[in-house]
Amino acid sequence: MKFEFENPTHLVFGAGTLSQIGEIVRKHGKKALLVTGGGSVKRNGTFERALSSLNAAGVTVIECAGVEPNPRLSSVMRGAQIARDEGCDIVIGMGGGSTMDAAKVMAAAVNYEGDPWEMIIHGQDNWRLPTSALPIITVPTLAATGSEMNGGAVVTNEKTTVKSFVIAKCLYPRVAIVDPELTLSVPPDQTAFGICDLITHVTESYFNGADGTPLQDRFAEGVILTAMEWGPKAVTDGNNLEARAQVQWASVVALNGWVQVGTAGAFPVHIIEHVLSAHHDIAHGAGLSVVNPAWMRFAAQTRPARFARFAQRIFGLSLKHPDDRDAAMEGIDRFEAFLHSIGCPTRLSQLEIGDALLERYAHDTVHIIHDGEGHLPGRPPMSEEDIVEILRSAL
Ligand SMILES: [Fe+2]
């Protein structure tokens, strides 16, 4: 297999690294749009610490607060307008995945010609990906999306109820400041959802990627095992800095591209979950926790050996033969039990989602991205009926 790989983001990792934000930002800009979410960074002092470091370094700060979970296109437009009006030359995304994603798209929207929604892949015939953006600095306060060190972002168009993604080279942050201390105040449920999200980032490529990627398989298994070892400790004791650090490093590695190199994998579980989030405004990781095991049981029918190996490598189950279906299903049951054990939902009913719109979710999912036969890419490719079946099994 041929592939190329580049991740240009400079990573600064470790407890206390937030204090370096001023000197880091100063190398890339003078006037920063500082994008934040619902206010937790102000309540726990992160905002003030960042502001004093930035001011001490001579960086002028213009604030864009209030980016919501499942960030909306209107928030992106608002932030881009502030950056234009104020003449900002750099964008800082400080918060969870939603805040960082919104900040990234704002940075690209500042100079984007036309409607910024056109840069989001949402079923249009011609993708108009952004080719330039203001320099981006990410400061994650939650271990989950990995957005701090990749070129992706997810935005919701609240007018059309579509949540989808953009991936572009210009969206890679210049610097990711990953300080695990900033995650100490994350509540147990959000911590658990983040753990589910990071694990799902690697199960997508593990189960949907090309054959013959033994090293990538081991990378993915390493991320999963690390998250399963340290994740429960972070959920149980939020002040366990070592657990927070291990989980956050796992979340960075899970989606900075390295695990996925050469796998050419699709992300069907994510595409399905995005539709549920668009309609019901649920937490991304919570939606994944319901959809992923249900999808696994469906996909294991056509690829039992892959799921049997997952059961063997992750849960130590012994296989009677390489495509041992019983072991495959047992492994999925155990994975679902793990998610349940850390407080993640595993049924749609726990998210107050019923069966009224199953066909609509399936239709919307396939509309966002589909192959020549109209199927959602993955292993196996899925028809709308398949997606309905998966979701129905998770009610
Ligand atoms: Fe995700």
Image (spheres, helix red, strand yellow):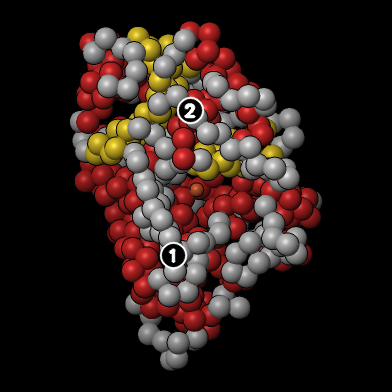
Please indicate whether residue 345 sits to the left or right of residue 126 in the image: left
Q: Is residue 73 above or below residue 12?
A: above
Q: Pick out the residue farthest to the bottom.
A: 320
Kindly identify the amino acid type of the residue bearing the numbered disc 1: Lys
**Residue 302 pos. (x, y %):** 61, 78
Q: Residues within 10 Å of mark 2 (few under 14, many from 20)?
A: many
Q: Which mark is residue 133?
A: 2
For the residue pair 148 and 261, the one nearer the viewer reads as 261
Locate residue 141: give its quadrant.
top left
Q: What residue is disc 1 on?
A: 2
Which of the image's four quarters has the C terminus? bottom right
Q: Considering the numbered disc 2 on the image, is that residue within a helix, a strand or a loop?
A: loop
Q: Is residue 180 visible?
A: no
Identify which residue is drawn at 44% across, 69% down: 1
Residue at horizontal 46 percent and vertical 50 percent from the top? 197
* In the rendered image, the vertical position of residue 203 relative to residue 364, given as above or below: below
Amino acid type for the residue under numbered disc 2: Ala
Q: Residue at x 42, y 37 (%)?
A: 172
Q: Viewed as shown, does residue 152 lie left or right of 214?
A: right
Residue occupying the point 53% across, 80% down: 304
Q: Earlier in the sequence, mark 1 or mark 2?
A: 1
Viewer can see residue 227: yes
In what element is the residue under mark 1?
loop
